[in-house]
Structures are given as C-alpha cells and as structure tokens.
Amino acid sequence: MHMIHAAAWRLSAAFALAIGMALASVVAVAAEVEVVRVNLFPTAKQLPFLLGNERGIFAKRGIKLDLQYTENSTTQRADLASGKVDVVHSAVDNAVAMVEMAGNDVVIVMGGDSGSNEFIVQPHLKGFADVKGRILVVDATNTAFALQAKKILLGYGLKEGVDYQIKAIGRGAQRLQAMIDDKNNAAAIMNPPFSVQAVQMGMKSLGRTVDLLGPYQSAGVFVMRKWGREHGPLLERYLASYVESLRAVFDPANRADCERLLRAQLKLSAEEAAETYKLLLDPKIGYVRDAKLDPEGFKATLALRAEIENKGAAVPPPEKYLDLSYYQRAIESLAR
C-alpha cells in the first residue's frame, strides 16, 4: 500500500508539474499579444476585420484588434496625429492631406481599393446639372471623395460656392440620413452598403466614380512614420493578418459567412448583404486582391488634389508619401 501511495504521489506531482508548465506557457503566449488600435469607417469595408477576427487570423499572430469607428475623416486624422490610434484604414488622400496641410509625418504602407463609390442623387434629379442651386453633402470638404465630387460637377460647369453649396456631414450613414431628411441635400458620393440602401430607397446612381474619373487609389493603410519604425515587426504581422483575412473574404466558400457578418454588423437585410458582398468583390470597384496599391491610381489621387484643392499646383512625387517595405515583407511572410 505504501508503494501504491508513493507511486500515486509521484504521478500527482508529475501531473501538477505538467499543468504548471502548461499554464506558464499560456501566460507567456498571453504576454506576447500586442494590441493594435485601428481607426476606420463603419462601412462594409470592415468585412476582412470581421471575418479575420472570427477565424482567429489576427490572434494567431499575437494581435488583438482595438477597432475604433470614426465619425468623419477630420476626427480620424486628428486621432492618428495625436497618437490615439496606431493604424488608419481610409482614403489615402487623407494621409496626403495630413502631410501637406498639417505637416504630419505620415506614411502610406498598403493599398486597398478604388473606393466602390457611386454618385448618388435625389430621385427627382435627372442628372449632374440638376445639382445646381442645391447642396452636395460630404464627409470633409477638402479631401478624398469631396474632391472627386467637385471634379465631376466641374465637368458639368458647376463650381463650388457659386452653383452649389457643400456641407460637411460625416461618414456614409450620416450622408444617407441627411439626404433622407432633407431633399435639398441633393447629392453625395457613397459606397456600400449605403449606396445599395440609397438606390433601394428610390435614389439614383449617376455612375461609379471610376467610370466618371478613371483610376483612383481610394482606400489604403497609413501610420505615423515614427510609429512604423518603432513597431516594424508588429506592423508587418498586422498587414499579413489583414491580407490573409482579405483572401478569406475572396474565397467563395466563405460567402455565407461574409453575408452573415455584414447583416449582423451593419443591420442589413439578406438582399442588401448579398448585393453589398457582390460589390465588394467587383474587380473594377471592389477590393484589390492582397490590397495592392495601384501606382497609376495613386498618381491620379495626387493629381486630383493638386488640381481641385491646390488650384493647379504641381503634382508631388508619389514616393514622398509611400513606404511599402512593410507590406512587401508581410507578403513574403505569407508565402513562407
């Protein structure tokens, strides 16, 4: 009996040691988890985060996401500059504006897409010329989609402040609501799901901005250059996680899950979610595979800002705003 008790004690001690080692391992792994504070708009473009989080894609690289949804790009830019957030997913023209207008040392580290944008107008308007005497609602007046809208209307002889007024409303849901509440809010550029909802409500799409203006680098990822230098390996793991999540969004086998996540997160109907997912994967206006930055599209983005916002100033060189080395190493890590 004494021998039995001794053997049992040894077995118990070994089991306790194994448990202790396992717990120590869990604690060590937990200690390696790093939080990345990500600022983005609450549009359908958040889908890779939703799917990636659900599948544990970010977690397996030791990343915990702190997603912060912005009201408008003005607040978004301020939050990045002040250090409240680490990474921004938004129109890259905002990064250019931060450099040129505020002197912030910002760098674009990955592309995204051309915006999935459509020029939406009230049901009673027949065309762009009918915006005359009315209001164009925008996120912010001096960046990104507002510049696209101004350029489009200028092509129809309409000048801001002379032929129409511009009103800063904020993110897509707020622009849609402003057009619902006041028919004098005549037009806005919108992307999914708000463009889908607007058309279903009877509003009109006068066309996609890439068809009206040509190539355009809309979405991308940017950080403060100093933060990128100090957190290079983390940034690379983050970008690799995002690209892997985006690849999962493209996988037809995940369509049902993607539509389910869109319905739940954005309170969409099944029909709205299906149409939104379809637009997100549209090869001309939707996600770009692996979130590659389009060099010609980015040149067009810079040219549009120079023409519309800077009154015909010289177009700056793209490399002033880019550091794609983190992205390149992230893609290489996915191939290993």
Image (cartoon, grey):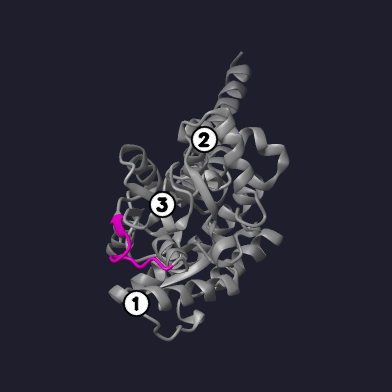
Q: Earlier in the sequence, mark 2 or mark 3?
A: 3
The image position of residue 153, as x and y in percent, is 43, 63
Query: What residue span does the magenta drawing correspond to?
Result: 157-167
Report the magenta stretch's main SS: loop
Q: Give the number of the disc on residue 100.
A: 1
Q: Badge 1 local density, few (<14 within 10 Å), some, or many (20+)? A: few
172 in relation to 243, above or below: above
Q: Earlier in the sequence, mark 2 or mark 1?
A: 1
**Would you say the residues marked 3 and 1 are in contact, meaning their CB atoms lie under 8 Å apart?**
no
- Name the foreground residue: 92 vs 235: 92
Q: Give the number of the disc on residue 125.
A: none
139 in relation to 313, above or below: above
Residue at 30%, 41% in the rendered image: 182
* Mark-to-mark CA distance, 2 and 1: 39 Å
Secondary structure at numbered mark 2: helix
Residue 36 lies in the magenta stretch: no
The image position of residue 288, as x and y in percent, is 62, 58
Q: Kindly report which numbered mark, 2 or 1, lies closer to the viewer in this rendering.
A: 2
Q: Give the number of the disc on residue 188.
A: 3
Residue at 28%, 65% in the rendered image: 161
Residue of label 2: 200
Q: Where, quadrant-wise, is the C terminus in this rendering?
A: bottom right
Note whether residue 225 is visible. Answer: no
Amino acid type at image mark 3? Ala
Looking at the image, residue 162 sits to the left or right of residue 302; the answer is left
Q: Badge 3 local density, few (<14 within 10 Å), some, or many (20+)? A: many
Amino acid type at image mark 1? Glu
Q: Earlier in the sequence, mark 3 or mark 1?
A: 1
